[in-house]
Image (cartoon, rainbow, N blue to C red):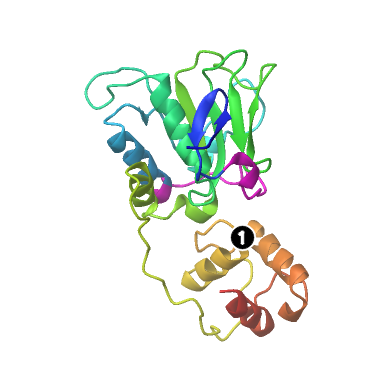
Amino acid sequence: MDASTDMGRTRPAGLTTLDDMTKRPYAGFDRVATAKRVGLESLIAAIADTTDGGLWNNGSLVVRSKRGKKGMSVHATGRAADLSWRPMGDRRRGSNYETAQRVADLLVDNADRFGLEAVFDYYPKPFGRGWKCDRGAWRKYTSRAFSGAPGGDWLHVEVSNTVADDPGLGDVWRAIWHDEPIPTAQEPARTRPYPGAPLRKGAQGDDVRWVQAIVDTWVDGDFGPKTEQAVQDFQQANPDAGPVDGWVGPMTWAELNRHA
């Protein structure tokens, strides 16, 4: 069977190669979450379950600064988790680096399905390695990029806002791990009637969530500055959406329905 290699490991033919990945902008820290994100938590639980506790949750939502650096950690957004293979007893039995490599490879090989933003592996010498969605490839670090490397017994995983609240993310992982068909979620109504008045900064509710999902920003039902900017970007990219003012009036709403 034909195969390719990455970081010294053999990858069977038929799996997505790193060169085939869709590159996407990297979000990083964008906003402090008020609660754990159900999509990420379901993915963490599924990884722990399928590895029989071999990789366990060593921390997801934590509001703190980056370790040894300025700025907020992505953990504060609820979109990042540390998965450790350190033996701790009970359901955190731990495993080995080979299991961690398999998990990392499956995440990266299915990066678009998981809305994967980054995976940082703290174990290899000289200073660990990292995969990010904006380059679509692993990079082996030759100088210190983060604390804890080399020799760190965990993976740091980040996902995008588009999947962070999707409760079906864990089921997708289980299907991929067991080489089974990917479950399909029931399709929601894509189009939506105009609410009768423009949506703008300060608006809240399901109509705002619908808009946020289409303009690809944080889906929380709260029309804040980031949503306003995302609407402006959408209007800039779609002339039929009307003036670039950050308001969702009838013209912008109609264009959103065309993209729903």
Left/right placement of residue 85 relative to residue 93 reads: right
What residue lies at 35% left-to-right and 58% top-to-bottom?
183
Residue 213 vs residue 170, the one in the foreground: 170
Percent position (x, y) of residue 253?
A: 62, 80
Spot occupied by residue 219 in the image (x, y as percentages of width and height): 52, 59
Give coordinates of residue 94: x percent, y percent: 32, 21
**Residue that protrudes farthest toward the front in the picture:** 1
Can residue 43 be found in the magenta stretch?
Answer: no
Number of marks in the rendered image: 1
Q: Which residue is drawn at 45% across and 23% down?
A: 154
102 left or right, relative to 48 = right
Q: Can residue 81 be seen in this view?
A: no
- Label 1 neighbour load within 10 Å: few <14, some 14-19, many 20+: some
| Vertical placement of residue 254 versus 4, above or below | below
* Secondary element type, mark 1: loop
Which portion, as a residue range, is magenta?
17-39
> What is the quadrant of residue 141 in the picture?
top right
- Seen from the viewer's position, the closer of residues 128 and 223 is 128
Q: Mark 1 points at which residue?
A: 224
Q: Where is residue 1 in the image (x, y as percent from the top left)?
A: 47, 37
Q: Is residue 123 above or below residue 245?
A: above
Mark 1 residue type: Gly
Which quadrant does the C terminus fall into?
bottom right
In the rendered image, is residue 185 in sight?
Answer: yes
Q: Look at 33% across and 21% down and name the residue there.
A: 95
Principal secondary structure, stretch drawn in magenta: loop
